[in-house]
Amino acid sequence: MDPLIAAAARALAMGDPLGALKTVALRRDAPGLALRGIAMAQLGELARARQLLRRAARAFGPGAALSRARCVVAEAEIALASRELRWPDAALVAARDTLEAHRDWLNAAHARQLEIRRLVLIGRLEEAERQLETADPTALPPAWKAAHELLLAGIAMRRLRAKPARAALARAARAAHRSGIPGLIAEVDSAQRLLDAPAACAVAGRDERVLGLEEVEALLASRALVIDACRHVVRDQRSQVSLVKRPVLFRLVRALGEAWPGDMPRDELVARAFRLRLADQSHRARLRVEVARLRRALRGTADVGATGRGFALAPHRAHEVIVLTPPAEARRLEDKHARVLALLADGEAWSSSALALALGASARTLQRALDALSTAGKVQSLGRGRTRRWITAPMPGLTTPLLLPSAFPID
């Protein structure tokens, strides 16, 4: 290998993009363009990095299938770091097949990790877990092991399994320190801080307390009837009722849960369920219809009984009703906006189309949420038009998963 190319690859593998640019900044050949693209990606210049990698792929030509596949993998990681989740994943699968055919097992493993990370981001956790089960990280270098453990931790956190998440992050931290890559160490530290941050608030009557992930996990395993405003479900020990696609019913049951063990007047229920200030007879008639629908939805879990002034929630098995809400700083906005904040909490820059895909929302609904969050100072945008991205914190100096250097092995 060209000594300058080898030196740049070693610098990138150690998380030193500036050192790599010192050796290949003026190179116009295919390997030089590729390594420049990776270095620019590590510095956060993702648009420029993508251009360089595409130029490198063209320069390698059709006879260099292995090098072109590595360029595709690097471009896929840039798309993932940019949260462009509509990037054609078929191209990444084809690149992985090419890498495996040429026995480039390390970069093939990296490509598979990118596939799994995309599945995690869009909420397809079962499929991500199945793919992780087939992966064997024991033969991988420390950086790849750390990325594997970060994936396990991310899935465990989304599953509300605090103990496996902490164990995975501890293994990731050990692997990251063995790798010596500053960006990877910072990534693991960020994930550990996220795990320690408040996960939700529990509201029971007038009592409200902040919960960590372990406490949320314990609450969901308790005998209480939990009205989960983070995921829009109602659950007890035996059953779970999803109201994600029925927002009016969820607003009703949440209002009744906050009033439990008392009842809530009809006019207040109309205001909460239909978001109206004044109620007339037509709204009260609609309330009766929606309450009947809520009774059918909660059949076997709880009942909604009529009282002299309104309605009250009556759990079948639970002796306590707790409303689980997003943390206080997110609850100041609409619940649907809190879901957007949860995705943006990773510190990465997301496109509005990627957020809409991950949340299963329409582009117009998502844009309204982003506008409201921007007005409230919770998020900020970068760029314009198709390059516009949304973040909750200043753009980091390094792309989040450190693995861009792996697209070009040193030896």
Image: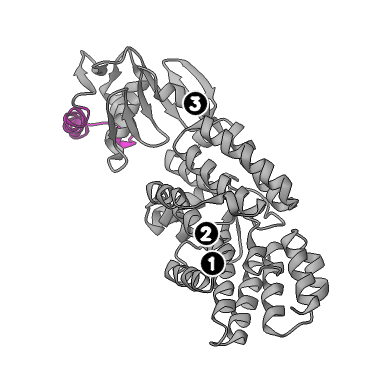
Q: Which residue is mark 1?
A: 76
Label 2 amino acid? Leu
Q: Nearer the viewer, residue 343 or 205?
A: 343
- The mark lying in front, picked from 1 and 3, is 1
Among the two numbered marks 1 and 3 on one chain, the one whose residue lies closer to the N terminus: 1
Question: Is 353 placed above or below 88 here?
Answer: above
* Residue at (50, 23) in percent of width and height: 215
The residue pinned by badge 3 equals: 201
Q: Are marks 2 and 3 in contact (CB under 8 Å)?
A: no
Q: Image quadrant of residue 299?
A: top left
Residue beneath the point at 34% across and 27% down: 254
Query: Which quadrant, please, contains the N terminus?
Result: bottom right
Label 2: few (<14), some (14–19) or many (≥20) C-alpha neighbours in 10 Å? many
Residue depicted at x 35% and y 17%: 223
- The mark that comes first in sequence, 2 or 3, is 2
Q: Nearer the viewer, residue 147 or 254?
A: 147
Main SS, magenta region, reads: helix
